[in-house]
Image (spheres, helix red, strand yellow):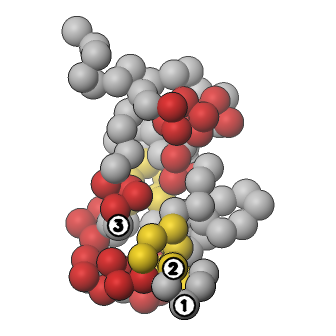
Amino acid sequence: MHCGACCAHFRVSFYWAEALENGLPEAWYEALTPTLACMQGTNSPSPRCAALEGEVGHAVRCRVYAQRTSPCRQVLAGDEQCRKARTSHGLPPAVHPLTSH
């Protein structure tokens, strides 16, 4: 993988039970409210998911990819959120895989 911008731009919050259902170890998320949790490192002024390994825009990987939560599974390369995150890291827009030829 060569981006990771969204993992280092947004707070990744989700219903707390989703982490249990996905088998996400407790060390990778924290409580926000009685019903919401977020990935460690994403609830800060300069968010960066603790599970993100490597340099944004270059070689990166998610250490908990198989256990990732719904916000991470819903990411689409080239969508509006992707463009915001990539811009914040000085990266050019990604091409959405469904519209590229």
- Please say if 84 is above or below 33: above
Residue depicted at x 49% and y 85% = 35
Q: What number is the disc on residue 72?
A: none
| Sequence-wise first label, 2 or 3 | 2
- Please say if 63 is above or below 8: below
Q: Which residue is mark 3?
A: 69
SS assignment at label 1: loop
Local packing at callout 1 (Cα closer than 10 Å; few below 14, some 14-19, many 20+) is few
- Residue 10 coordinates in the image, percent (x, y): 59, 54
Front position among marks 2 and 3: 2
| Sequence-wise first label, 3 or 1 | 1
Q: Quadrant of residue 31?
A: bottom right
- Please say if 74 is above or below 1: below
Residue depicted at x 30% and y 86% = 20
Discs 3, 1 touching: Cβ within 8 Å: no
Q: On the picture, is 72 further left or further right than 89?
A: left
Q: What number is the disc on residue 34?
A: 1
Choose between 66 and 55: the one closer to the eye: 66
Instruction: Assign the C terminus to one quadrant of the image.
Output: top left
* Separation of marks 2 and 1 at Cα, in angstroms: 6 Å
Q: On the picture, is 9 further left or further right than 45?
A: left
Discs 2, 3 touching: Cβ within 8 Å: no
Instruction: Assign the N terminus to one quadrant of the image.
Output: top left
Q: Which residue is mark 2?
A: 36
Amino acid type, label 3: Thr
Q: On the picture, is 89 further left or further right than 62?
A: right
Amino acid type, label 1: Pro
Local packing at callout 3 (Cα closer than 10 Å; few below 14, some 14-19, many 20+) is many
Choose between 22 and 5: the one closer to the eye: 22
Front position among marks 3 and 1: 1
